[in-house]
Amino acid sequence: MDYTNQKHPQNYSQMEDLKTLDLEESVSETIMRDLRMIAYKLKYVLIPKEQEDNGKELRNWDLWGPLIFCLALAMTLSFKADSTTTSSKSDVFAIIFVLIWVGAFVVTLNAQLLGGKVSFFQSVCLLGYCVFPINIEAIIIAFIGSYLPFVVKLIPVIICFAWSAYSSVGFMASLVPPHKKKLAVYPVFLFYLFLSWFSLIV
Amino acid sequence: MDFGIQNQTDEQQQANKEPSNQNGNEGNKKQTGCCAFLTVEFYTPYFNVTETDVLQRIQGTFLPLRPDFLNLIRGNPDLWGPIWINATLIFMITAIANLRQIDEEKENQSFVISYVPQATALLYIIAFGTPIVLAAVMKFLGVDLSFFQTICLYGYSMSTLLPITILCYFQNELFLWLIIAYGFANSSLFLIINLKEELDKLQIQKKYIIIGIVVTMQLSLYLFYKLVFFSYVKE
């Protein structure tokens, strides 16, 4: 088999074949491959049209993407917390970080307890990838937020919150029995609402 | 925990290792033994509700003098309510306590993020710790208390705080103290009336110990609320 021609695999399982070459390729190639994988998954999760096979691609879960977005969000929000506020930068960073991971854990646990048969890390992976729109709105508000009145700031916040929630709700709702759907979906809303609200206020 | 569908071989190995690590059993799902309460399956029966059930139970807490609530949860106490009502409250406390301060000082925006861990600790310790204390005390006094029913009771009693938190946005001190007092009275009455069934099994003097514990915890919850989260904001 000739691996050198498979530089841009169509799906993740083709990437598996390339793993044997890990030690022989340069560091930049490895990093680029991981970044491409994250970008691929991100497109898959956030753009509904790509999901023709009902979430089967999510079986190849990874936690790099969620970690990157979580760190980016925590850093963006903690940069804005300066000496005029009563909470220090490290407080804000720590609380956002813990909030994202514990929140994802608890929301997934909730879905499992309601009877959903889902792989734990698959769900945490999905919730982590859907934090990306919140990242976008945090960056927008961090840069141009001080020049805008409160009401105008609400517009990107609401759009990004709706985008995050809509992307993850479809997956979550399909996991549990129909009469418990709202009980599984509400925590997801609460989770993204909390994060969106932080990016608006800090 | 159930790690679900396995595609890669290392994930398969991890899943096969999981059951054999649990408590020396053969790897079957039903774990009996001292650590059964650490598995997910142990708690699944307590999530057997729908959204209409949850809403009805929350409504049942607003009028404590009517004994609807016990009839609603009889035989089917749930844990979804306690966990997520408290989570909603944590969000609302952080949101409203900070909104109050933002409107006041335009230049010096003081955003307090420490409300999140404080609220989490306060709410979950009171909602889950007090039933544990009550169960221990009742056991000591010789009566068995149905543990999950009490947790359910306590969790739903927190729903009185939902409208109160929203109303705490207003700056009027007298108004705040009034609604805090109302909330305290409402939730204490709710708890005592619904615990009455179990309390009647005790003697009169011992009843007051339990009532005392309940009232003290509620008082500390509401005082903490007022003094820490929604304290007086200088004009």
Image (cartoon, coloured by chain):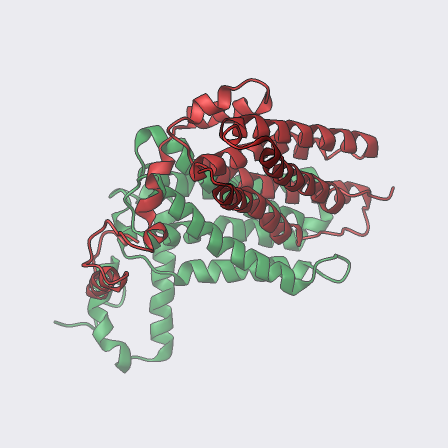
Chain colours: A green, B red
* Up-down relation of residue A139 to residue A29 (above or below): above
Which quadrant would residue B171 be assigned to in this image?
A: top right
* Up-down relation of residue B121 to residue B184 (above or below): below
- Mark yes or no: residue A192 visible: no
Q: Position of residue B84 (x, y in %)?
A: 50, 39
Residue extending farthest top: B66
Q: Position of residue B208 (x, y in %)?
A: 63, 35
Residue appearing at x 30%, y 41% in the figure:
A116
Q: Position of residue B46 (x, y in %)?
A: 37, 37
Residue extending farthest bottom: A24
Q: Is residue B6 left or right of residue B192?
A: left
Q: Nearer the viewer, residue B210 or A82?
A: B210
Q: Nearer the viewer, residue B156 or A123?
A: B156
* Up-down relation of residue B100 to residue A72 (above or below): above
- Mark yes or no: residue B28 visible: yes
Q: Nearer the viewer, residue A95 or B31?
A: B31
